[in-house]
């Protein structure tokens, strides 16, 4: 999207050792007079990392020093948090008028196919986005809008029930992933993804003599040999990692990890 807008992506590296979270010093070093915005995702897809209030406060202090920099805060996984209540970078008054929150019903309310999202932003930004959105896609269906109204205004017990189910699945996949010797993992604090470092398998060969060169190769191998779908970390700017979703039943997760372990053990 940044490229389509004729902008330049500046990627701040924050690997496994940092739990995939950037520091204020890294952010400060990356900002130039041409910087327009920080795109921040917490809870994060694909890593499951969640920024604490203290960590967000540190980033907010940096942003406050640069009045031309905005924050696009992707908070779509707001309700899927395993470490406490959701913290938004918009809570800090010194930058509140430069934060655009992105959210929707897809994740927290399991309404992925309904395709409804929203922004919370200063009015002048919201109005500008409305002008563009009205020309691009017109708007979501009336049925989707009424369903979303029910989701937001109804009893929220089901949201917590689902969060607990995801936390149980998180614990299950972390346990199974630790049993695969070639994976290095962090424990996801939110969302429903595991993002292990799988580089131990790079350079290994399949039974057909093909060499695993990167995480995309490994994802394809797991699909073809284990019949398990993952996504190579190349797609997320982290080529040493592979993304796994645990948004499915416990039984399917157990079977998936069994298949993956068998396929990975077969690599030479």
Image (cartoon, grey):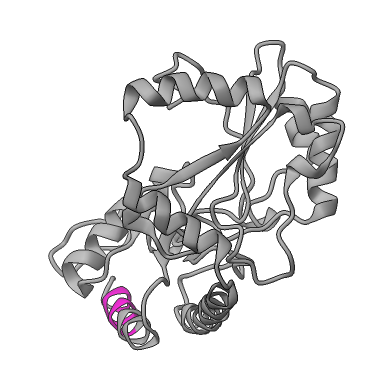
Q: Residue at x 59, y 72 (%)?
A: 156
Q: Is residue 32 magenta?
A: no
Q: Is residue 260 magenta?
A: yes
Q: Is residue 227 above or below residue 14?
A: below
Q: Nearer the viewer, residue 50 or 116?
A: 116
Q: Is residue 246 above or below residue 146?
A: below
Q: Is residue 14 left or right of residue 111?
A: right
Q: Is residue 196 at all visible to an observer of this figure?
A: no
Q: Residue at x 49, y 62 (%)?
A: 151
Q: Is residue 221 above or below residue 129?
A: below
Q: Residue at x 41, y 65 (%)?
A: 244
The image shows residue 266 at horizontal and vertical percentages of 26, 77
Query: For the magenta stretch, what is the residue range?
Result: 258-265
The image shows residue 268 at horizontal and vertical percentages of 28, 71
Dominant SS in magenta: helix
The image shows residue 153 at horizontal and vertical percentages of 57, 62
Q: Is residue 236 left or right of residue 213?
A: right
Task: Give the quadrant of residue 146.
Answer: bottom left
The image shows residue 204 at horizontal and vertical percentages of 31, 62
Specify the quadrant that holds the N terminus. top left
Q: Is residue 181 at all visible to an observer of this figure?
A: yes
Q: Is residue 38 left or right of residue 56?
A: left
Task: Give the quadrant of residue 260.
Answer: bottom left
Task: Give the quadrant of residue 137.
Answer: top left
Q: Residue at x 87, y 31 (%)?
A: 94
């Amino acid at each position: 999207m940044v490229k389509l807008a004729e902008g330049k992506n500046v990627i701040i590296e924050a690997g496994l050792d940092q739990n995939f979270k950037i520091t204020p010093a890294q952010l400060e070093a990356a900002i130039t007079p041409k910087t327009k915005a920080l795109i921040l995702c917490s809870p994060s897809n694909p890593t499951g990392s969640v920024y604490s209030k203290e960590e967000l406060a540190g980033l907010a202090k940096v942003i406050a020093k640069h009045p031309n920099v905005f924050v696009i805060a992707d908070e779509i996984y707001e309700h899927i948090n395993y470490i406490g209540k959701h913290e938004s970078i918009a809570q800090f008054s010194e930058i509140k008028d430069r934060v655009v929150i992105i959210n929707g019903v897809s994740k927290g309310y399991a309404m992925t196919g309904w395709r409804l999202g929203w922004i919370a932003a200063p009015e002048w930004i919201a109005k500008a986005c409305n002008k563009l959105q009205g020309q691009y896609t017109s708007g979501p269906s009336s049925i989707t809008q009424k369903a979303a109204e029910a989701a937001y205004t109804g009893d929220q017990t089901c949201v917590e029930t689902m969060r607990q189910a995801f936390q149980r699945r998180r614990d299950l996949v972390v346990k199974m992933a630790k049993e695969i010797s070639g994976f290095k993992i962090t424990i996801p604090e939110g969302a429903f993804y595991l993002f292990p470092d799988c580089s131990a398998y790079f350079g290994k060969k399949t039974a057909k003599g093909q060499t695993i060169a990167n995480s995309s190769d490994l994802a394809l191998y797991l699909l073809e040999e284990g019949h398990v779908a993952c996504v190579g970390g190349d797609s997320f700017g982290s080529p040493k990692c592979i993304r796994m979703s645990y948004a499915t039943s416990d039984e399917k997760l157990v079977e998936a990890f069994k298949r993956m372990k068998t396929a990975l053990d077969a690599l030479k």
